[in-house]
Image (cartoon, rainbow, N blue to C red):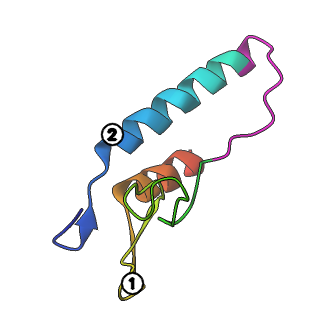
C-alpha cells in the first residue's frame, strides 16, 4: 500500500535478506550457487490471483501506470552496493 508516496514492504526485505544470508552461507560451505533471481521487478498480473498479490520490487498503479520503488528496492540496491 502506498502511503505518503512510499511503499513500506518490511516483510519482503526480511524474506529476501534471510534468503540471501542462507545462500551466502551455502556458498561459504562450498555449495555451487551461481546466482539469485528475485521473483519479479514490477507488480504484475498473476494468472491464478489476478492483480491482488504484489510481488514486485516496484509498485505499479495499474490505473495510471505510475511506478514507485518500494523500500525493498532501495534495500536491494544498498545490498548490491555492498
The residue that mark 2 highlights is 11
Q: CA distance from mark 1 to mark 2?
A: 23 Å
The magenta region covers: 27-37
Quadrant where the N terminus lies?
Answer: bottom left
Above or below residue 26? Residue 44 is below
Above or below residue 73? Residue 5 is below
Q: Main secondary structure of the magenta part?
A: loop
Decide which of 19, 25 is in the foreground and name it: 19
* Element class at badge 2: helix
Q: Position of residue 50 (x, y in %)?
A: 45, 62
Q: Position of residue 2 (x, y in %)?
A: 23, 67
The residue that mark 1 highlights is 66
| Residue 19, image quadrant | top right
| Residue 31, image quadrant | top right
* Element class at badge 1: loop
Above or below residue 53? Residue 34 is above
Decide which of 58, 45 is in the foreground and name it: 45
Q: Position of residue 40 (x, y in %)?
A: 58, 57
Report the side of 31 relative to 11 (left or right): right
Residue drawn at x 37%, y 59% as measured from the top left: 52
Amino acid at each position: 500500500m502506498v502511503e505518503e508516496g512510499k511503499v513500506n514492504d518490511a516483510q519482503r526485505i526480511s524474506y529476501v535478506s534471510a534468503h540471501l544470508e542462507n545462500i551466502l552461507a551455502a556458498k561459504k560451505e562450498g555449495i555451487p550457487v551461481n546466482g539469485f533471481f528475485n521473483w519479479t521487478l514490477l507488480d504484475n498480473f498473476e494468472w491464478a490471483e489476478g492483480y491482488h498479490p504484489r510481488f514486485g520490487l516496484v509498485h505499479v498503479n495499474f490505473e495510471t501506470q505510475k511506478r514507485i520503488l518500494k523500500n525493498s528496492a532501495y534495500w536491494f540496491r544498498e545490498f548490491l552496493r555492498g
